[in-house]
Amino acid sequence: MINARNITLDLGGRRVLDGLSFFVERGESVALVGPNGSGKTSVLRCLLGLVPYRGEARIDGYDCAREPIAARARVGYLPQRPCFGDATAEEALRFVAHLRRVEPGRVPEALREVGLECHARDRARTFSGGMQQRLSLAAALLADPKVLLLDEPTASLDRDGQADFLRIASALRRGGRTLLLSSHRAEEIAQLTDRVLELDGGSAGPARPMAPLILLRPGRAAP
Amino acid sequence: MRIRETALVAAREVRQAVRSRWFVLSAASFLVLSLGLSLLGLAGAQRSGLAGFDRTTAGLLNLALLFVPLVTLSLGGLGLAGELEDGSLAVLLAQPVTRTEVYMGKYLGLLGAVASSIFTGFGLAGLAVGALAGGGNAIAFVQLVGLAVLLAAATLAVGTLLSAALGSRAKAVGGAFVAWLALVYGSDLGTIGLATARALTPGQVFALALLNPVEQARVLGTLALTSRPEVLGVVGIFGQDLLGTNGLSLLLAAALIISAAGALGCGWALFRKAVVP
């Protein structure tokens, strides 16, 4: 479902990803782990076309650089810091619904699913971190995407918020979606993922080439 | 570029602009100043015998030349940079929409919001003048409204270019202010300085003026009101001698459109390769 080959990314004169290759099967749930600066978030940004990279990344067969619309139509994205500008919760979801050609009538149901139906007309920027993350999840799931990319989704949440999020995300995992999750949290990784891909050497200097992907748990290796 | 997706992004931008305090404050100030200048112009017209629309148009032209670049440069500057900084651009670009659609949608949405503010301000001023005095050249007044929108399109494109080039809210606002000073004041002073120091010919001064959208709009707006040489200045007189009134008007309108398209194209070239955090 996700196939990355030889991805190389340079940002600000620094090599962040160096020839990275990996494969995530349909329905599989995989965690990207590694120290700060190892390039976890950058992998997700490459898949979304937010940064110019070399190499080839495909989602459901679509090239993320050459066919970005088709690739992104198959992806729901949950950023670390969700932001919806000045929009209300309902407006934010309606906008996503229009862009993804989803029936706008689905918006109230999506808000209900994440427990925000009473806050539909409130500005998203007034929400707590947990509420913003739930709204972001509703936006990511609105078009029922095949793939979910989650970037440290509980990093800014308190304990209750984390528990809430893990409950919802566990249900998603059981629903057969493909999940690629960047995370530091052992509990989140254990509960949500089948396999861990460790990125090492994001800060490697020229004398120490970036190590290839290491499989920490049994799973399918990159082809 | 798909029209539907671009229109969706533009509509979102209009909603955001209408909720922005800076835009609301600017639009309200523009409305108050337009009405104030018109009413003051009418009071003066009764003493001097000038017709209502002529005097109002002259006053509002100066207001547009100062105010429209100030608002559009800062709005354009904040447009991309603000969303880059707060992370909402990453959320937007994660949707099935291209960078070109986002870039053009944001530009057109902001232009729509500014144009509405111009129509409201000048429209109410026009109604007030029409009701209280009438007379004079109402067509020049309508041309002034069109000219203000064209100037807004050019300076908003410059603001958008600054936003794409500088990438942070603080830098973009600073850049917008410097650009405003340069376009509204610096250009005139620089041209005078250059003309004096390097003994520029009128043709060279005319060519320099064609690089500045505010100067293009100033001469174009003045031509709509009068063709008297003492009002047009060296650029207008030279252009009028060279091309005639209609030819000069066409050239200046084309220069404004080219300024807008050029700045917009440069901004797009930067934005399509930009790293989105």
Image (cartoon, coloured by chain):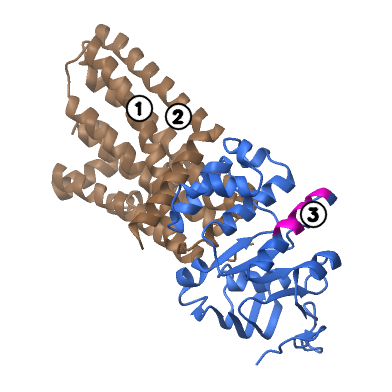
Chain colours: A blue, B brown
| Marks 1, 3 in one chain | no
- Dots 2 and 1: beta carbons under 8 Å? yes
Question: Which quarter of the image is occupied by the N terminus of chain B?
Answer: bottom left
What amino acid is found at the position of numbered circle 3 in the picture?
Gln
Q: Is residue B85 magenta?
A: no
Q: Main secondary structure of the magenta part?
A: helix
Outermost bottom residue:
A223
Q: Secondary structure at mark 3?
A: helix
Q: Mark 1 or mark 2, which is nearer the start of the sequence?
A: 2
- Residue range (magenta): A160-168
Q: Which residue is mark 1?
A: B120
Answer yes or no: are tags 2 and 1 on the same subunit.
Answer: yes
Q: Could you tell me how far apart the alpha carbons at marks 1 and 3 are, in whole angstroms?
A: 49 Å
Q: Residue at x 24, y 28 (%)?
A: B141
Q: Residues within 10 Å of mark 2 (few under 14, many from 20)?
A: many
Spatial CA span between label 2 and label 1: 9 Å
> Of helix, strand and loop, which one carries label 1?
helix
Disc 3 marks which residue? A162
User: Tag 1: residue type?
Assistant: Thr
Which residue sits at x=61%, y=40%? A117
Give the residue at mark 2: B27
Disc number for residue B163:
none
Q: Are marks 2 and 3 in contact (CB under 8 Å)?
A: no
Residue type marked 2: Ala
The answer to whether one can see residue A106 in this image is: yes
In percent of width and height, residue B132 lies at 25, 10
